[in-house]
Image: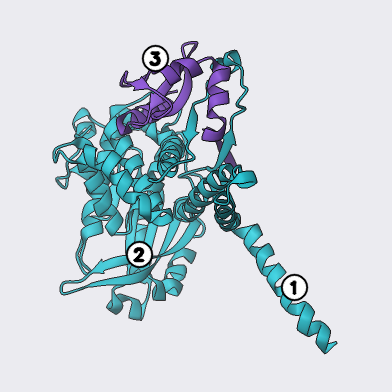
């Protein structure tokens, strides 16, 4: 019996480990298989065809791993995984023309990893925020695609970030007044505050659900500009600063609650509960982002329980964020909870609002009354 | 989660693919032109193949043309 335990159990343990990874992290398996295929392809000869498998699994494994991590922060952002589909090299011309598909060339000799850069950019461009991007200004769309693709490359293939920046980002951002350059700067600021994926990209996802299928409207472009102007000062804030934390737009209505004043938390969460109920709930906030240090997670849960009837806990995310104090910066583990109002209408009653909001108010939405810019395309 | 196919052709099958589409000779001779910048496209700089208005079009590997290809896709 001891010998069985000694020899069988370790084997079962490894098998169980592999099974868990395969079930829950298939992208990791694909990344590992890509390494094996690459090594095989280097042998040449009968293994020459292994390069094709390496390219496919390397792309799929890395991009889909990024998508998996991204969806933890903003589930609506990308609803699909990447799958490389090799075309039939004997596809007849008529069939190709009728099929309407773009076919990307993936190279055998690729010292600068352009295969990965092009395929990643193509995937991000076509799959990221599909619904809202139709309604954004071209410069807004391009900036978001460039920035997210940079993040993908930074996390999955840092060696090719330089190639991407030199060829795609810098030419657009060299001119300081370039609209894309300004937007990319804004996105970077929001990202340093840890608000890019969990808040901005998430809100764009919600926006897309509301406007998809409707005609294009410049007010959506203005709203997105407003979102950026709203989030920048929050991303830059120092601990203790007072900021405007409620966004009351035509399409996006949300509030950010920063939980953490030690004096408040020591006694009770009621001040936060009271604020949420009297301000955010009363104003019809559709989403409430509650942000706290990870060690205050249980306090945040106390707050969320008070609103279970009206708000669904959409997700909980832990991530590292740079906190700025007056005299120092600190990388701290943060806990974010996203509360989404139950039964939020997908068809936003903007038609009703148009009937009651004056022309002046429409031209100067509430979030602009604190002096934020709006008009940039 | 669903999967989104990205159609691709590997270099090992590129010649057969272009021959099947009837454009191999033109590409090898540099007679095809990029749909976005109009530069001659050969096997060296060919980046993508796509149908447009009943014809087979090609795109080169210039970053501006890669971006134009993305734009074309997003509008399609």
Marks 3 and 2 sit apart, C-alpha to C-alpha, by 72 Å
**Residue that carries the numbered disc 2 in the rendered image:** A274
Are discs 3 and 2 located on one and the same chain? no
Q: Position of residue A96 (x, y in %)?
A: 57, 19
Q: Position of residue A142 (x, y in %)?
A: 31, 36
User: Is residue A65 at least partly visible in the picture?
Assistant: yes
Marks 1 and 2 sit apart, C-alpha to C-alpha, by 53 Å
Q: Chain of mark 1?
A: A
Q: Secondary structure at mark 1?
A: helix
Residue for point 27% across, 72% down: A330
**Residue that carries the numbered disc 1 in the rendered image:** A12
Task: Determine the residue located farthest toward the top in the rendered image.
Answer: B54
Quarter of the figure with residue A366: top left
Check whether the beta carbons of the residues at disc 3 and disc 2 lie within 8 A of each other: no
Front disc: 1 or 3: 3
Q: Secondary structure at mark 2?
A: helix
A328 relative to A137 in the view: left or right: left
Residue for point 58% across, 40% down: B3
Q: Secondary structure at mark 3?
A: loop
User: Is residue A283 at least partly visible in the picture?
Assistant: no
Quick one: quadrant of the C terminus of chain A?
Answer: top left
Marks 1 and 3 sit apart, C-alpha to C-alpha, by 61 Å
Are discs 1 and 3 located on one and the same chain? no
Q: Which chain is cyan?
A: A
Q: Which chain is purple?
A: B
Q: Chain of mark 2?
A: A
Would you place residue A37 above or below residue B43 in this image?
A: below
**Residue that carries the numbered disc 3 in the rendered image:** B31
Front-most of A69 and A206? Answer: A69
Would you place residue A257 above or below residue A10 in this image?
A: above
């Amino acid at each position: 019996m001891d010998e069985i335990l000694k020899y069988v159990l370790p084997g079962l343990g490894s098998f169980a480990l592999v099974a868990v990874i395969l079930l829950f992290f298939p992208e990791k398996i694909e990344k590992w298989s890509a390494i094996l295929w690459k090594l095989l392809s280097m042998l040449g000869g009968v293994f020459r065809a292994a390069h094709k498998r390496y390219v496919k699994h390397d792309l799929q494994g890395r991009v889909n791993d990024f998508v998996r991590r991204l969806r933890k922060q903003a589930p609506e952002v990308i609803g699909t995984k990447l799958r490389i589909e090799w075309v039939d090299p004997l596809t007849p011309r008529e069939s190709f023309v009728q099929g309407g598909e773009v076919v990307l060339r993936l190279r055998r000799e690729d010292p600068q990893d352009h295969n990965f850069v092009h395929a990643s950019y193509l995937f991000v461009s076509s799959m990221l925020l599909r619904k809202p991007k139709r309604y954004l200004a071209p410069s807004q769309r391009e900036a978001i695609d460039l920035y997210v693709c940079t993040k993908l490359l930074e996390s999955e293939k840092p060696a090719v970030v330089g190639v991407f920046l030199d060829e795609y980002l810098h030419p657009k951002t060299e001119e300081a007044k370039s609209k894309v350059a300004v937007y990319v700067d804004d996105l970077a600021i929001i990202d340093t505050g840890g608000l890019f994926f969990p808040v901005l990209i998430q809100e764009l996802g919600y926006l897309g659900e509301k406007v998809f299928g409707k005609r294009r409207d410049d007010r959506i472009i203005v709203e997105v500009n407003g979102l950026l102007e709203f989030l920048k000062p929050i991303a830059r804030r120092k601990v203790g600063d007072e900021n405007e934390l409620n966004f009351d737009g035509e399409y996006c209505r949300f509030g950010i609650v920063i939980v953490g004043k030690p004096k408040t938390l020591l006694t009770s969460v009621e001040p936060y509960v009271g604020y949420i109920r009297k301000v955010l709930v009363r104003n019809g906030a559709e989403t409430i982002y509650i942000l706290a240090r990870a060690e205050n997670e249980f306090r945040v849960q106390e707050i969320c329980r008070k609103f279970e009837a009206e708000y669904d806990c959409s997700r909980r995310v832990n991530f590292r964020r740079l906190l700025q104090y007056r005299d120092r910066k600190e990388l701290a583990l943060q806990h974010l909870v996203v509360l989404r109002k139950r039964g939020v209408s997908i068809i936003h009653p903007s038609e009703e609002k148009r009937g009651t909001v004056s022309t002046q108010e429409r031209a100067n939405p509430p979030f602009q009354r604190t002096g934020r810019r709006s008009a940039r395309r | 989660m669903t999967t989104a196919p990205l159609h691709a052709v590997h270099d090992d099958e590129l010649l057969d693919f272009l021959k099947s589409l009837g454009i191999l000779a033109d590409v090898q001779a540099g007679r095809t032109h990029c749909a976005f910048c109009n530069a001659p496209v050969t096997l060296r700089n060919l980046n993508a193949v796509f149908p447009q208005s009943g014809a087979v079009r090609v795109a080169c590997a210039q970053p501006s043309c890669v971006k134009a290809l993305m734009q074309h896709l997003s509008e399609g």
